[in-house]
Amino acid sequence: MADLHAPQKLFVAGDLDGFFGLAVDTLVQFLLVLGLCQGVLGFPAELVLGTILPGAALSILVGNLFYAWQAQRLSAKEGRDDVTALPYGINTVSLFAYVFLVMMPVKLAAEAGGAAPDEAATVAWQVGLAACLVSGVLETVGALVAEKLRQITPRAALLSTLAGIAIAFIAMDFAIRTFEAPLLAILPLAVVLATYFSEMPMPLRIPGGAWAVLLGSAAAWILAASGQPSPVSAEAVGAATESVALHLPIPVVGDLIAGFSHPLFASFFVPVMLPMGLFNILGSLQNIESAEAGGDAYPTAPSLAVNGAGSVVAAIFGSCFPTTIYIGHPGWKALGARAGYSILNGVFFTVVTIGGLTGLLAALVPLEAGMAIVLWIGLVITAQAFRTTPAEHAPAVAVGLFPAIAAFGAMIVTQTLGAAGIAAGDPSLATTALEQPQAFELSGLRLEGLTALAQGFMFTCMVWASASAEIIDRRFARAGAWLFTGGALAFFGLVHAGAMGPAGVVPDIGLGTGWRWAVGYALGGLFLLLMALWASRSNTGGPKFVDRPAEPSADSQETT
């Protein structure tokens, strides 16, 4: 259909706020890549700064430009000037999974086979490239069927999963960081809450997010000048300038092929790469639903396809970290961001990485100065899950929060054990402790139950929140179907079956690995089918709430 209206302005004042928020989030991912690749995997700085980060930036640029164009197209089609582009960047969950569950084991195996540390690091990077490409291909293929899944899943299920991730992995983490550094972070938090919640315009027409970053950075440099502990220093800036150099993205097809042909690649395809690819599809679906709940209905297939294409670009140009449609569209929309913030983010980080400026940027602007914006995004996402679903479905949203909270708890357990091992000078301490779950039970922590609830938590969130929403509406047969789906996922180990390891929960994927949970789900599903039969015979079935707001239908979405 031809555009009937002029699109909204490409850049508006809110795009600056949106850029600061998304840039902080992207910078966090880049710093994680820098720290994990060098500190954990032992990759040389030249590989990280010269190949991985430029490749990641190029993949982010591709997606950011597309989603900005997509927003402008939707604006022109609907005649609106309040359309916000889908946020996009590196997938944090895949980042940790590929570092600790793919590249680290490959590196250790290569070293055990006699490879030198540099050679082992190269092999780990090559297999990581292959894993990234697999993720991109799976998401691109998944775009063909994802809309069907979205149509049959209650909104409460899609949004409650996001809310769990937002409150546990985003808001909570940055809240902890805020009160760890009160002299730096509480002022920016107050600025963000005051300006974003009240929507009060700030002096000099400077957005609230910009004020937060400026004041937080000023506080850090004042502390440094006064001799107090501070994350910034002139020495750090001087050292960062030494890494400034031109790093153009260059295809690494030969290394990508080497990763696929390595014998260890097949070992990680089913247990890690396949489920991570499915998780990425699911997460993107939830974020598209979140955008529609916020008023911007984007077509599922092209949104997912370009998301997958971004990961393919990343792999071809040297980044082993898949990209994804980010959580947080309602937050960026509330900031007044439209399409320009997406363009600014993509262009900015392309320039930063090509110029080797990542370290310098981190040295000049402390993370504490801008993390309040990301914390606020987490709060808005959590609120949206309750606000934009039918009021009677609120319990279903709440049910969906538990698996994500369990996953956060599992992460805390492994991090704590790792810290204890470092303090004791015994890296094997974590493994030793995890092999004795009875010790955790004596201390009041049900480790096996925590592991089961955390493994595959995104699927578990959807299954139980969907079943709960259908039960609330007295659609017992549909609820039973969701539990049978959960049973099938459990039977193959995609949820619940697994073990806690030093790097987190490791799934046990295979035929019948989760049979105990599968049987439990089957029994629950059979009971719900009996409830459906009883309801039909007693004429009490069907939707319990007939006046609830209707969820958007497939007809409201743009077709391709």
Image: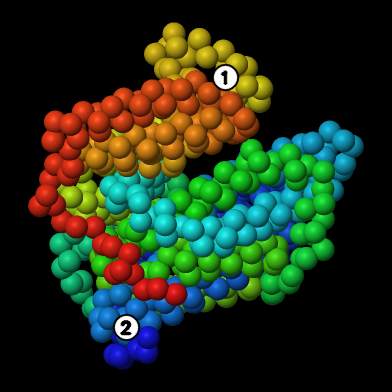
Identify residue type, mark 2.
Answer: Lys
- The scheme the figure's colours follow is rainbow
Residue at 29 percent across and 78 percent down: it is 13
- 527 or 325, nearer to the observer: 527
Q: Seen from this angle, which residue lies furthest right? A: 114
- 20 or 440, nearer to the observer: 440
Q: Point out the image quarter for the C terminus.
A: bottom left
Q: Position of residue 14 (x, y in %)?
A: 29, 74
Q: Position of residue 369 (x, y in %)?
A: 38, 57
Q: CA distance from mark 2 to mark 1?
A: 56 Å
Residue at 59 percent across and 26 percent down: it is 513
Horizontal arrangement in the rendering, residue 96 relative to residue 383 (left or right) = right
Residue at the spot of label 1: 434
- 138 or 522, nearer to the observer: 522
Horizontal arrangement in the rendering, residue 518 relative to residue 298 (left or right) = right
Q: Residues within 10 Å of mark 2 (few under 14, many from 20)?
A: some
* Disc 2 element: helix
Residue at 67 percent across and 52 percent down: it is 131
* Disc 1 element: helix
Residue at the spot of label 2: 77
Q: Point out the image quarter for the N terminus.
A: bottom left
Q: Could you tell me if residue 430 is visible in this image?
A: yes
Marks counted in the figure total: 2
Q: Residues within 10 Å of mark 1 (few under 14, many from 20)?
A: many
Horizontal arrangement in the rendering, residue 412 relative to residue 532 (left or right) = right
